[in-house]
Image: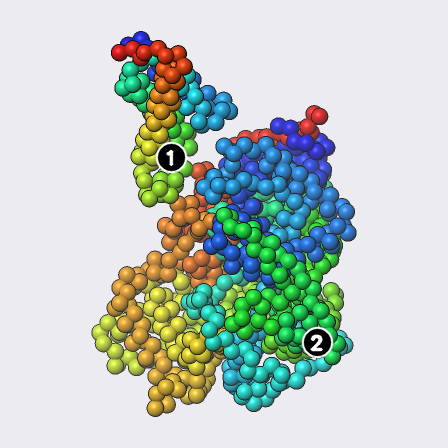
Amino acid sequence: MNLPGLKGKVEVVYDDLLVPHIFAENKEDAVRVQGYITAQHRLWQMDIATRKAAGRLSEVLGERTLNLDRLARRRGMVFAAENDILAWNKSPEGMRLLEAYTEGVNAYVSQLSPANYPVEFKLLNYAPEPWSPFKTALILEAMAETLCAGENDLASTNALAQFGRDTFQFLYPEWNPKQRPIIPDTGQWKDWKVNLPPLPAVGTKAGESANGSLSGIFDADKHDFFQNENPDDDYIVGSNNWAVAGSNTASGNPLLCNDPHLNLTLPSIWFQIQIHTPEQNCYGVSLQGMPGVIIGFNENIAWGVTNVGHDVSDWYKLQWADAARTKYSLDGEVREVQKRVEVIKIKGKTDLLDTVKYTVWGPVVYDHEPENPLRDCALRWITHDQPDPKVIDVFIFLNAGKNYDDYKKGISAFDCPAQNFVFASRSGDIAITVQGKYPVRAPEQGRFVQDGSRWSNAWLDFIPAERVPAMKNPSRGFVFSANQHSTPPTYPYYYLGNDFDDYRGRHIYDRLDRMKNATIDSMKTVQLDNFSQRAADALPLMLRLLDQNKLDADGQKMAAELAAWNFHYDADATAPPLYEVWFDSCYLKTWDEMTALRAQKKQVLIPERWRFIELLEKDTANIFFDHPATPQRETARHIVNESFAAMQNYFRQNPQKRTGWGQSRGFVLKHIGQIDAFSRLDVTVGGHGSAPNAITRTHGPSWRMIVELGEKVQALGVYPGGQSGNPGSRWYDNMVETWAKGEYNEILFLASAGENSSRIMGKQTFTPSSK
Amino acid sequence: MKNALYLSLSILILGNLGHFGLPWWSLVPVAALAGWLFPLSAGKNFAFAFAAGLLLWLTNAFLLDAANGGLLSAKVGVLFQGLKSGYLLLLTGIFGGILAAFGAMTGRLARGAFVGEQAKR
């Protein structure tokens, strides 16, 4: 097989899982072939992912995706990708590799005839396009949109205005004292001098908001803000990773584990690959459109990532200086918005020209929606910034890393979306770094919608790289993360986090803390652990408040079933469906003050679940347990009993839901294009967002990896999908059952192209084009 | 009856040109050529061409499906209102039959129009 641009011969060995093992004479050839092969197996996925990020879905799908496209454009996704390219161009070496990858993709695309297009192109009737580095930037921005776009600015602002300062702090504390931060305080930051920006004025009484001038403007009477919100899906994306030092393992070798929890789709977001060059021998999962391995290992090191919860997305309320909203005031000076015209092509219609206004803060996202409460606000989002030019090399560099220093050096340019990079080396080091770029915030800065007329509210500085939380070889013998708070409140920089309950983190800590002589098998039991610390905290409190003697026979049976539950969300357990409905009912009935406001389309933050459980434990007479609509004063006991009756009623009306948890909750593994014929809707699995095995209806562990860094690396991995993106291939979904059963595939980590293994299916040789 | 045999055989054999890079609709000109070269009555022309086209596409669809272990046809069947694999193959065959029949009919009529020769009984 000829591949233009190659410098030498490249051999590709395919194993029985259709994993390509690339053996190249240099890095550039390796990524060129990686591009070719990725396109060969996942071309439509690459296309649709970049279309979604770039707001170009309507071009092929018609008007039904227009709103999605407009939002992508208006949130500055294309703007951000353009800034990536500006930065990457300053890294010629990295750019050269990205271009080789691009040419590899395009070598595959250009030889395709319509008859050979992936089936989705045929069904949707359009043709594949050439790849470009810009599209790689779009893939990165799509990850940023998934991982670091979270914020509660409006909901917090409204809650503060509604309840006043004291109640607000009571309902929404930022630190759960029971949680285990990623990096504990060991005195490492006690001598730091930190200059925080000035504190904006904050109201103290009900009716006042974060900033006096902003009061009362965020009502959205008609705006349908909640059409997609489902209180059952409290957990969206997250991940677990950890590394155990040799001192705590049976073999004395370090172990590293990672399972990123993402939207589970077919084809899967990940593609397994091995890349061997004279400088490296690396194996792991790659992202479509990106050269190198994102999560994986080589002979010397292993690494994995989880998402950092830091809020890096803020809204600023503009003070318009003219009626046309094209000028705004900043520190008394009038500035003009910069207009960027987005041309959105729509299949079968004329193009939509959408003008997006850019301010010093960023784009004014919602000014095309008159009813939108954020209509006059601009979005300040870290991913719009030009990244560190070296970010383009991060994974390429890491793939060839040999030790702790290479790891630190490699990830140092990675700024967004911030990730907890866990690390282990064969030489015995373990480490974790909360890697990313974070604004230095005054306490509570960015928690609320901010006044955009004052530059003092801006992100004026960023946490210096050497002060970003990190830890190496702690005496406890393990490092871990589960999206929880990076640090305890003693860390000198203010942590504004997006609410992750941290129950996974607490339980993983408990498991690893107790574990001596850890093995690959014991690592499996942690990744597959269905135990929910949240349920273990909440259910005994609920049962204590339940008047069991007043229940009918069926109710008593349910209560007994719940009391006997071991808090494991196993697929066949019948108690979890009861508990879920009961708990959700308690939770929502308690916060009826907020849900009532939400019903009026006013976005108000609902307290986190851990805070609710804490009140259930310590403050059962709290005023929030009272229903404002009833004359008598309710307490937690009323809520718990009322909700139990509601739960009984629910199962009377939905008897089919009273079955095993896996069946009752349901699970869908959808095709990316939502084509049911190409989806797997027949899989039953346990797990829960608050358990380490964080499977929800649509999300879950998208790649389970366990690596033991011994003399010879031993590794296991599995994802719910298959290597091929072709729905007609037997490798399209061949790992789904393995994953669902909690089994793993042994990873075939070849030392050379000539190595023998019964698992090798075939070989392909790429040679430089003769012309 | 000889012409009927020739017509059927030429569609069955030349219809496979599609495997060598020609588009799927190459079946139509192939059938038209056969219809021109081997004159038959309207009924026979249609019936034999249809049978040959059906057999050709049904066989090919069956072979492709067998090679794929029936994976794709099962999924595409779901796309078509839950059609079973077998029916999908049959449908493919019927399409082949219709295309071949219309092609052959075109060839036959063209010959009538340009050469003016009466179709044989």
Pointers 2 and 1 in contact (C-beta within 8 Å): no
User: Does residue A67 lie above or below B27 as drawn?
Assistant: below
Q: Residue A156's spot in the image, x, y percent?
A: 55, 77
Image quarter (top left, top right, bottom left or bottom right) of the N terminus of chain A:
top right
Direction from residue B54 to residue A708 in the image, left or right: right
What amino acid is labelled 2 in the image? Answer: Ser
**Relative to the observer, which residue lies in front, A658 or A380?**
A380
Residue A597 falls in image quadrant = bottom left
**Residue A36 horizontal side relative to residue B51, left or right:** right
Name the residue type under label 1: Gly
The CA distance from mark 2 to mark 1 is: 66 Å
The type of colouring in the image is: rainbow
Nearest-to-viewer mark from 2 and 1: 2
Q: Position of residue A449 (x, y in %)?
A: 60, 76
Residue linked to disc 1: B70
Q: Where residue A329 is drawn, which disc sits there?
A: 2
Q: Quadrant of the C terminus of chain A?
A: top right
The crowding category of the residue bearing disc 2, from other C-alpha atoms within 10 Å (few below 14, some 14 to 19, many at least 20), is some
